[in-house]
Structure formats: structure tokens, C-alpha cells
Amino acid sequence: MAAEVVLEEVKVFGLAVQEDDEEATAVAEKLAELCMLHGLKENELADELVAFAARKQTFLLTVDFLNIFEHEALNKRPTTSHKRKENRYSGIKDINTIQELLDVEEDEENLLDAYTTPSKGSQKRAITTPENPRSKRTASTRSPHLLFSPSSFSPSATPSQKYSSRSNRGEVVTSFGSAQGTSWSGNGGSAASVKLFSSAEGSLTKRYKFMFQKLLENREVLSCKIEELGEVLKEHYQIEEFSSLIIPTQEPVTVLGQIGCDSNGKLNARSVILEGDQEHSSGGQVPVDVSELAEFSLFPGQVVVMEGTNSTGGQLVASKLYEGVPLPFHKPTSPIEEPEQQMVLVACGPYTTSDSITYDPLVDLIEVINKGRPDVCILLGPFLDAKHTQIENCQLTASFEDVFKMCMKSIIENTRSAGTRLVIVPSLRDVHHDYIYPQPPFSCCELSKEDKQRVLFVSDPCTLEINGVIFGLTSTDLLFHMGAEEISSSSSILDRFSRILKHVLTQRSYYPLYPPAEEINIDYENFYHHAQLAVTPDVLITPSDLRYFIKDVLGCICMNPGRLTKGQVGGTYGRLYVQQQISREERKSPCIAAQVVRI
């Protein structure tokens, strides 16, 4: 009887129930339950329901919608019956009660607005079409099991207006080499071989324990790095012997050490110090005068060999700086006789705009993958960005790991028809993952037998071999971190990006900066084993917030594909054509062509 009265009341305002008898019966039972549990009269419940439906712009009554109505509106009414119910069901929590706990203030303000008395000049409510109308089915459900439905884990999943209104989709912003034909397409991974580079000394394939480091062990790792690079430079430049940098001498000497800064501030030409190796200088430090060097490029943590004089023992006046030596390129032991050209697509997160948690940019990228069918698609994090406003404010209604699983499920299932091999690289900005460098691969996704052959989860950083072509991958913004610390005085044609990338290759490390940026937590024992270059890669992928580029540095093709989103607008992604070169004489780059394209 109570349900019939409520339905008659709400029908006047355009609310209706589905014609399905089973659904109508369930709605009637739910209305009767609400009247009884919350101690409301029929007309009071109808008034509450009409106001809530108007705010949600929903005109179809379903059981799911009434559940949302109960959690977001009725449970916040300061009544004694509400308190009794809250105490009785305090141990029961579902996706809606979690949302209720996370954004109580916002919902209460909206609820109060619905009851605000209109001003005299606006007695009639203006009938307007919402900017982003939602279908009745979408508006009436909050199931966390929906496949990648943003409304299931965000209370305000509104698409970004700036992103959807962009006009430069598909624009090529920079390119390298020459692509055959106007359209880029691959073979859908049918002939692609993707594996971790076998020459690396044990790849990082699982999580490890961290936050237990001894300073002595860290010191040993840094000392080993100085000694190993010192031996390489000594052999390459045929240096007879290194001298101590702390012993006064009137004659020019050659010393080995690591660049540092004499204070906690930023490195500059007058604050350079050199920390010597343990064997020759016992780890001693001495200031360095670089005014006599014709050109130099230095950063904290750089292992260098210098020639100069230290007449007093208190300052080294440098007269020569030896160039670093990169590792050799990989030469396949059994090269393919007729290697096929492979298309590799590279994209880096975040995959949402800053003003919305909807994954529209990722959906557009999946469309690009299905259309072009690249052989390999490398996706670098963050997939759930810790810097996103809604994540910082804890406005998601599902756990971070659940949202990530939905994201991965959407990517894997929606690219299955294309057949593209997927490589997933984590990021330190992934809010649900281990916040340590080197970062282990994601481990929370269970793959089917078919997908296990197609999807590869790797660590950050990692070295991959794709049909004989070596790729170096890292999602850490080393360009930004090193660019903020590097100083130079150079007349050469190298720009800052090229200088930094040259340092990465000659220091033979994915992150040669020491001390690292404040946002980076490094486990130096694993850093020594898993963050060093085994060979000079043919292609180095280094995503950054800085401007996108494609550069040839010491024969290595270095690409910053940019990020898929830049604030509220669309960003860029990269694509490459690579083919293993079988020339046994002079080495040729396997990267035939590369482009950076706007999403």
C-alpha cells in the first residue's frame, strides 16, 4: 500500500518504473522497505526521491537507483532511525558506503542545494539539457564489476571538455627517418618475438623486500661503479696509473672520482667537488676549478677522469676532462636471414586528463592500436596517477588495485582482436604499486593462457629484445631530474637533451644521478644488478614531462614520446619501424623511421 502511494506521487514529476513485472515488484518492495526502515511517510519519501532524482537527472526507478538513493540521501538524514540502522549495519560496507565515506562533504552540500528555497526571481526551474547526458541504464548502476566503467569507481566521472574538443588529432609533431607510405600499420604481432634481454645479469621479475639498507652497502655499490668505469676509461685512453687527488703535487696528474656538490644547493661551476675512489684517494674530496676547461658537462654522481694540478692539496685545477665511453651494441649470435619490419607503438601515462578520471585518452589509444595493428605496443605508467586530484583527495569508490585491474582488463581484452604484443612498464607514480627504484613488474593481474603469450609485464627499468633489436625502457623522468642538476660550458652543437642522453649511455646506467631526486627511493643493492645497461640499446625510450623528441645519440635512437595527456588536454605517443640489420661490416641503425603523434 505504501509503495503504491509513493509511486503515484512520483509519477506526477515524470518518474516511472520499468514495465517488467519482476522489476516493478522489486521496486515496490524496496520503497516499502525504505518507508519502514527510515520512519518516513509516503509523501515524505516521495519528496526526497523526486529531489534526489532531479539532482541525478534520472527518470527511471530501479532497485539499483533506490540503493544509491538510500546511501547518498536517506542515510545522511539526522534521524533516530538512521542511527539505529547505522549501528546495526556498521560492519557491512559495499561500494556505495565506501563512496559515502569518501565524499560526505560534497554530497551533503549538493543535498542541501536541492532543498534551498529559490529566490523570488526564479520561481520556475529552467529546463536545460545537461552538457554530458548519461543514459538511464548508466545512471542507475554502481556495480564495481562493470568492465572499465569510470562511473563504477568515481563519484564524478565526467569526460574532460577540453580533451574531447581538441582539433589536432593524429598530427605528426616530429619525425625521424622516412616511412614507406602514408599510413603506419603492422602485422598484429604475428611475427613478433618479445623477450627480456638475455645478456642482462638476471632480470627483475618479481617483488623484493626493501626499506632495509645499510649505508656501508650503499657506499660499496657507489665505489664499485667508480672503479668499474675507471677501469674502462683507463683501458680506452691507455692511462698508465691514476694518482691520488688529495696529495699535493706540482706536476699534472690524472685522477678518478665522482662529481659532487659542496652544499645542499644546486650544482654550479664554483661548487664542484670531486670524490676520489677508494684505491687511490681513499674516498677523499677536493674542490675542482673548472675555469680552464674549454668545455664540460657535469652532474652530481658522474664518474669522471680528470687531468690537472693540485699544488696545495686543497683544490684541483682541472685542465682536461676525458670523455665517457659507451658500451658496444648487441650483435645477435644467430641473426635472422630475412628479418621482417616491425611496427612498435610507445605510449606513456597518465591515461586520464587532470580534470577527469574517465579513461577517454586510453580508449582513443586502444582505437589507434586496433586500427594500425602494431606488432608490439609498449605502455609505460602511470596507469593510476598518484598526482591526479581525485586520487590525492581519495575520491575513488573502489580500491586503487581494483581500478588498476579494470584498466588492465580493458586494455588486454580490447586489443585481443588486433593480436598486438603488449609490454606493460610500471611507474613510480602508480599509486598502488611499490614505490621503489628499480621497480618490480606488476603482479596483480591474472592472465588467461592465451594472454600470457601476448602480454609481458616488465620492471622499470628494463632491457628488451624485439626481433633482435634491443630496446632500453624506463618510465622514470630522468631527463627532468638530470636536466635540473646538469651544468655545462660547451661550444659543441649538442643540446641539453643530447648531453643528458649521452651521459646515460657513457655512464652505462639508467639513472646515473647521485644523490637522486627527492621523489626517487633507490634500493642500491638491486640498483646495481637491475638498473645498469648491459649493452648500448638500439632504441632508448625515456618518457618525460619535457618536450617530446627523437634523437640519434652515439648511434642509439632516443625517443621521448611525451605523455598521453598534458593536464586537461591530449598529449602524444610514439611509433617506430624497426628491422634487424644483417650487415656484417659497418653497423646500421635498426630504426628505419620514427614519429611522435598527437592522440
Image (cartoon, helix red, strand yellow):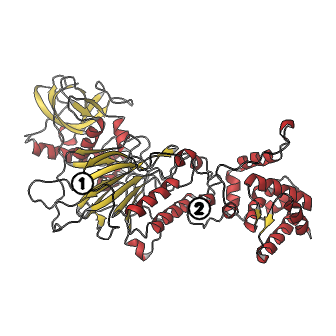
How crowded pointer 1 is (Cα within 10 Å; few <14, some 14-19, many 20+) is rated as: many
User: Which amino acid type is marked by label 2?
Assistant: Ser
**Relative image position of residue 263 (x, y in whole percent):** 36, 29
- Tell me the residue that label 1 is attached to: 591
Q: Quadrant of residue 490?
A: top left
Task: Say what secondary structure mark 2 lies in.
Answer: loop
Nearer-N-terminus badge (2/1): 2
**Relative image position of residue 562 (x, y in whole percent):** 39, 46
User: Which amino acid type is marked by label 1?
Assistant: Cys
**Relative image position of residue 305 (x, y in whole percent):** 17, 37
- Tell me the residue that label 2 is attached to: 149
Task: Say what secondary structure mark 1 lies in.
Answer: strand
Residue 221 visible in the displayed image: no
Task: Check residue 369 in the rendering and tell me which mark sits there, or answer none.
Answer: none
Q: Quadrant of residue 375?
A: bottom left
The reply, left or right, for residue 34 in relation to residue 170 is right
Residue 53 visible in the displayed image: yes
**Relative image position of residue 70 (x, y in whole percent):** 78, 60
Spatial CA distance of label 2 from label 1 is 38 Å
Residue depicted at 85% across the width and 60% down the height: 10
The reply, left or right, for residue 363 in relation to residue 70 is left
Give 504 or 537, whichever is nearer the viewer.
537
Above-or-below relation of 155 to 123? below
Residue depicted at 39% across the width and 31% down the height: 264
The reply, left or right, for residue 159 in relation to residue 475 is right
